[in-house]
Amino acid sequence: MSRRAGLWIAFAVVHLAVASLGFVLPNMPMGDVTLVYEPWARGAVEGNGVMGIAQQWVYPQLAIVPMVLALALAWIAGYEVAWALLVTALNAVAFALLVGRGRSAGRTAAAAFWLAFLLLLGPVGMYRLDGVTVSLAIAGALWLVGRPLLASILLSIATWMKVWPAALLAAAVIAVRRRLALIGGALIVTAVTLAAVFVAGGGSHAFGFVAGQTGRGLQLEAPVTGWYLWQAVAGAEGAFVYYDSEILTFQVTGPNVDAVIAVMTPILAIAVLAVAALGGVRAWRGASFAALFPPLALALVLSFIVFNKVGSPQFLTWIIAPVVMGLVIDRRRWRTPAIIALLAALLTQLVYPLLYHRLIVADGLAAGILTLRNVVLIALLAWAVVRVARAPARPRIARTPVRPRVP
């Protein structure tokens, strides 16, 4: 059996297994698909209002597209199966682009990592909108050097579904020489999207997803929430886990929580800008795309996760594309961070969906696993930042000054 055939067999097995786990694991791992994606899609096609146009939405406007596409496949075996088929099909396209003819050891390692990560992360990596954006992000990242305009269009489309691919686009603008093509692709997608939104009458909600994120509280799984979560575990007065019925998620509160909520968005912005500035300095000093882009993309993505007051388990899918690119370019150097990323994926599945019913009642074991997961993510962020700082610069050619002739 060829290496390529083996990878495709593994692809089929992993996707079938992960799709099946969504139906058998506890705590509703397909909850978002069933409870919100399908009603939103039906509302759009039945004339009851398109989210992000008729009213403010937590997602950018293009997020409705995959939800409606899945609805078109719901006749097969219901909306949940349709969603799994849609994600699998998109992953197959990106996987084919990644594997190619199966002759590259780096691409083989990257493909194996992607499959292992999906299996360890479990159904939340498939039954969330993030699962759709991962395949677009991988395809876009692979085309950054050879087809930067197309890469930018793919990454921008993904960004207008879920904001996180903007981190990859930012890293690309810093690390890739053909920046105008990248900026042009982003402007094209943004202009077309906003034009469609305004024509449809949703201009007042065009950027509603920004306000929707900044106004949220401390989500249970976010790293910053650990301080209050452990107070809740200890039974401290005023610290407890509660369910926010408006945004359909569990959050944590405690003493002075409003102040923490208020400063987290500025801290997130500062962290992202600091990492981007570091990458910009290394690019200015001549760091190559191969040396700079993968760690910079990973550092930016992890900054979005580590300093975010929202910490949904599907956020872990964001690190797939940067690690895949790192393995494609330099599999030996990226072996250790890839293993660390796999550990983070496994710990995330233990937290959600397996132990989530214990986490929401502030159980010590579940809180301990979640804390360990967050520590792993922080360590991975530190590694990525160090790699960006140490990205080798091209030596500058010294020019011998020409001395004027003395008559």
Image (cartoon, rainbow, N blue to C red):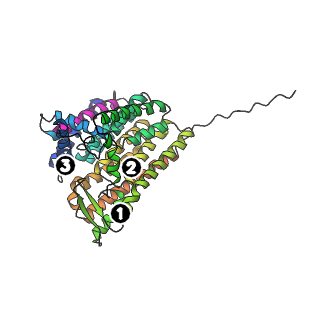
In the picture, the disc for residue 304 is: 2
Is most of the magenta stretch helix, strand or loop?
A: helix
**Residue 360 location, x and y as percent?**
23, 61
Residue on which the image places disc 3: 31
Front in this rendered view, residue 214 or 322:
214
Which of the two labelled residues, at mark 1 and mark 3, occupies the earlier sequence position? 3
In the picture shown, does residue 34 fall above or below 139? below
In the picture, the disc for residue 350 is: none
Which of the two labelled residues, at mark 3 and mark 2, occupies the earlier sequence position? 3
**Residue 88 location, x and y as percent?**
23, 36
Cα gap from disc 2 to disc 1, whole angstroms? 20 Å
| Residue 359 visible, this orientation | no
Left or right of 46? Residue 324 is right
**Residue 8 location, x and y as percent?**
26, 32
In the picture, the disc for residue 258 is: 1
Q: Amino acid at mark 1?
A: Asp
| Residue 303 visible, this orientation | yes
Q: Amino acid at mark 2?
A: Phe
* In front: label 2 or label 1: 1
